Amino acid sequence: MKASDKEGQLCGVRAIIFDFDGTLAVLNIDFSLMRERIMALVNHFGIEEGSIRERYLLEMIDEVYPILWEKDSSGAEEFYERAHQILHEVELKAAGEGKLILGTEAVLRMLRERRIKVGIVTRNCEEAVRKVFPDIDDYCDVFISRDSVEKVKPHPDHLNSALDALKVSEKEAVMVGDHIIDIQAGKRAGMMTIGVLTGKIKREEFEEAGADYILRDVSEIYPLLKE
């Protein structure tokens, strides 16, 4: 259960912040199609793929935007709008077939009953998340999609925004996610981190990233919480 495979408990935790896609819900977003369409757009605007340093699409869009702005501000705005429209379209399509992971609602309800604050942060757009989880506001104290922040995880600002809204310190909160990005974001924000194996990341990768705990799914948080 712990990264070192030793049992442990979460003591003094006042809030748990969850990623959404792959952690609380199954959304089979076609990232290959998304990347293909974004790169075609980048090429259309005259930027060579080899010159882009960023690996993740949101950051890639943010890298290309100022380059285009120096040449043509209206072109930069057009690129930014069209790129985000591509993301939005692919995400909404996946959301139409998405569903919550079994037990998600029970876990969130249990935490709030035990007066542990719940946050949900995601790089996904708000509309897609709400399509999968229409009652999300009834199950968490704060929900922050990429639409509500300038910098998304793994940048710590995304989690810091949630911490501020929850009115807890980083030492009183835990970040839970299915991707290395979630662990990186949590560590950069000074939080304890939990990796869950409901996504595509393997136990060994979470161990290498320094996750404090590695669980099969979010339901395994139960035994970690001290009565």
Image: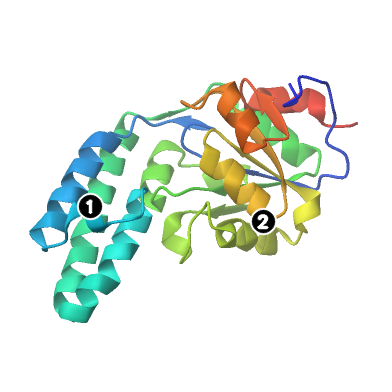
- Residue 184 image position (x, y, % from top left): 59, 46
Name the residue located 27 percent from the left edge and 49 percent from the top edge.
87
- Identify the residue at horizontal 46%, vertical 25% (top origin): 200
Q: Quadrant of the C terminus?
A: top right
Q: Amino acid at mark 1?
A: Gly
CB within 8 Å, label 1 to label 2: no
Q: Point out the residue furthest to the front here.
A: 50
Where in the figure is residue 202, as x and y percent of width and height?
A: 54, 23
* Quadrant position of residue 139: top right
Q: Which mark is residue 189?
A: 2
Place residue 212 in its image quadrant: top right
**Cα distance in 3D space between marks 1 and 2:** 31 Å
x%, y% of residue 123? 44, 49
Name the front one of labels 1 and 2.
1
Q: Residue 195, relative to residue 149: is it above or below?
A: above
In the rendering, which numbered label is found on residue 70? Answer: none
Q: Which residue is mark 1?
A: 50
Q: Is residue 26 above or below residue 172?
A: above
Identify residue type, mark 2.
Ala
Q: Is residue 63 left or right of residue 205?
A: left
Quarter the N terminus occupies: top right
Q: Mark 2 or mark 1, which is nearer the start of the sequence?
A: 1
Is residue 141 visible in this depiction of the protein? no
Name above or below for residue 208 compared with residue 19.
above
